[in-house]
Image (cartoon, rainbow, N blue to C red):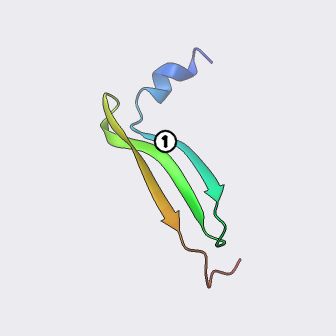
Amino acid sequence: MADAWPEMGKLSVGLPAAAALLDSNFLSVYYAGPSTDGTSVEWVRVNTRGASV
């Protein structure tokens, strides 16, 4: 794991997590920003109505 930190330090977007919502949609949360020292938590609600697999 120690070898992964330098590589992860190059990224300013990541660590997504998703949760199913009661209306069949889902919520995804992740961090993003212009640099590794300037990130914020972002979220997006995804509407799956009408989607096919």
Q: How many marks?
A: 1
Taking the view exactly as shown, the residue that stands out farthest to the right is 53
Q: Quadrant of the N terminus?
A: top right
Tell me where residue 11 sits by quadrant: top left
Q: How far across and how far down the image is residue 45, in percent?
A: 50, 64
Judging from the image, what secondary structure is the residue with disc 1 in? strand
Taking the view exactly as shown, the residue that stands out farthest to the bottom is 50
Name the one closer to the observer, 33 or 22: 22
Q: Amino acid at mark 1?
A: Gly
Q: How far across and how far down the image is residue 46, in percent?
A: 53, 67
Q: Is residue 42 above or below residue 2?
A: below
Q: How far across and how far down the image is residue 10, in percent?
A: 40, 30
Q: Residues within 10 Å of mark 1 (few under 14, many from 20)?
A: few
Q: Is residue 20 above or below residue 41?
A: below
Q: How far across and how far down the image is residue 47, in percent?
A: 55, 73
Q: Is residue 5 above or below residue 47?
A: above
Q: Is residue 29 above or below residue 12?
A: below
Name the one closer to the observer, 10 or 36: 36
Residue annotated with mark 1: 14
Query: Going 61% across and 69% down the picture, which residue do you hit?
Result: 25
Q: Quadrant of the C terminus?
A: bottom right
Tell me where residue 40 sits by quadrant: top left
Query: Going 43% across and 26% down the picture, which residue do you hit?
Result: 9
Query: Going 55% across and 46% down the picture, which residue do you hit?
Result: 16
Instruction: Say left or right for 40 vs 6.
Output: left
